[in-house]
Amino acid sequence: MMKAILFNLLFSAFTIGAAAQGLQIKTGDQFPDIPVRNLINAPVVSIQLSKPAIDKIYILNFWGTWCSPCIPEMDSLARLQKQNEAKIQVIGISDDTPSRLANYLKNKPSKIWLSSDTSGFFYQLFALAYVGQSAIINSKGKVVALVRTDSINQKLITRLIKGEIVKSSAALKEKAINNNDDIFGVDSTLNSSFTLRGYMVGQQSMSKRYILNGAYKNRRITFVNSSAESMYRAVYGIVAQKQIAYEVPEKEVSDFDNKQSLYCLDLLVKAEEKDSLYNILQQRLQQFMPVKARIEYREMPVYALVNKNFNQKESAKENLSYGFSGRGYDGVGATLANFANDYLSNELGLPVVDETGLTQKYDIKTNVEVRTKEGIVKSLTDIGLELFKKEKKMKVLVFYK
């Protein structure tokens, strides 16, 4: 009997995996005969949307507890569902584990059904470019629209209930272009090079600083499908959003919905100039980009990071290596100054300055249950750190023409 059960599980996993590889759901398609499983707060543990048993409009919202904009979007959807409870049912699908979703519900009870899809199966099935987007399925199991979640309001719900056509607004992934070669044509024999061009189809937005041993160590930097703002921020070391000021419309500086405003840049400097890599890139940006930037110093509110009972161990690693997401920070060889600036300033919007008095390097790991300010503050309390607000003069990146 156990062998039969195991076979059925493996067969189900195989068929679903095969479906994901060969199927993409588009607007106008019938929802496939695949159940949405792992519903943790619904009257059923799975639902078949190809032939819904209840005559409702189903909104599949792709989100995550690690996605800060997703939290208020879920609150908005909950209100809309309450106002139209006889007509719509929202299902929040995320790659969070069931236990993480259960913790979320303890703090934010919801009548939105939550589904754990740790493989990202349905997210990939719709070929969505990012979370915070929704698929809308009518009572007959037809996909009527793929939309940005922040576009869902009562007006749109009313149109759906009337059976009117709703325009899709979701951003979908482009077909990836597999290219193992250097997309900028740079090789180790070059002494120096500089390339600036527009959007490149089939390439993911990314940036890279070459810090490992090799021909480009510490003398090359690359940006692919990046905004002017993200490039300027990188070279001027600006992390917190509050350290940005605009003397031009913000969309001229950063608009990822407009591919015409995205750029690909690659800079390789001479070996003897590697310590000036960022200075040289600043000059190139000022020379060739349509938007310019300057640094000013302004008094502003900041968070000070202080030590209450810091409990992370000192690191045996000399070099810094870290990563972070909405679920927290994981770094080795990190100072508290690294942690404050690189991570907390990004997450909290305001600059975070290290006032712990601790100068050693540590292995730091945090766990953020929900990506809100409260969730981040709790993760700091768990490792013996606290924040308090103060005023401080900080550098500000000002965009102008």
Image (cartoon, rainbow, N blue to C red):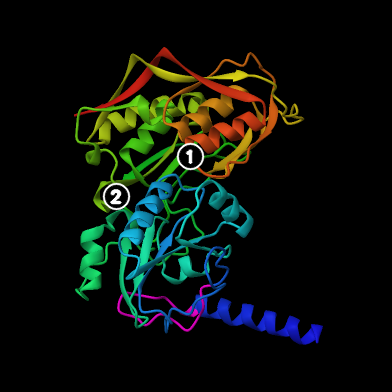
Q: Nearer the viewer, residue 137 or 313?
A: 137
Secondary element at image label 1 = loop
The numbered dot on residue 198 is 2
Amino acid carrying mark 2 in the image: Gly
Q: Position of residue 263 (x, y in %)?
A: 32, 46
From which residue to which does the magenta span run?
Answer: 22-36
Up/down of 276 relative to 32, above or below: above
Up/down of 21 relative to 206, above or below: below
Secondary element at image label 2 = loop
Q: Residues within 10 Å of mark 2 (few under 14, many from 20)?
A: some
The C terminus sits in image quarter: top left
Residue at the image point whose x is 50% and y is 76% from the top:
47
The picture quadrant where one finds residue 239 is top left
Q: Position of residue 86 (x, y in %)?
A: 34, 70
Tell whether position 27 is magenta: yes
Residue at the image point whose x is 58% and y is 28% from the top:
339
Q: Is residue 25 left or right of residue 162?
A: right
Q: Residues within 10 Å of mark 1 (few under 14, many from 20)?
A: many
Amino acid carrying mark 1 in the image: Thr
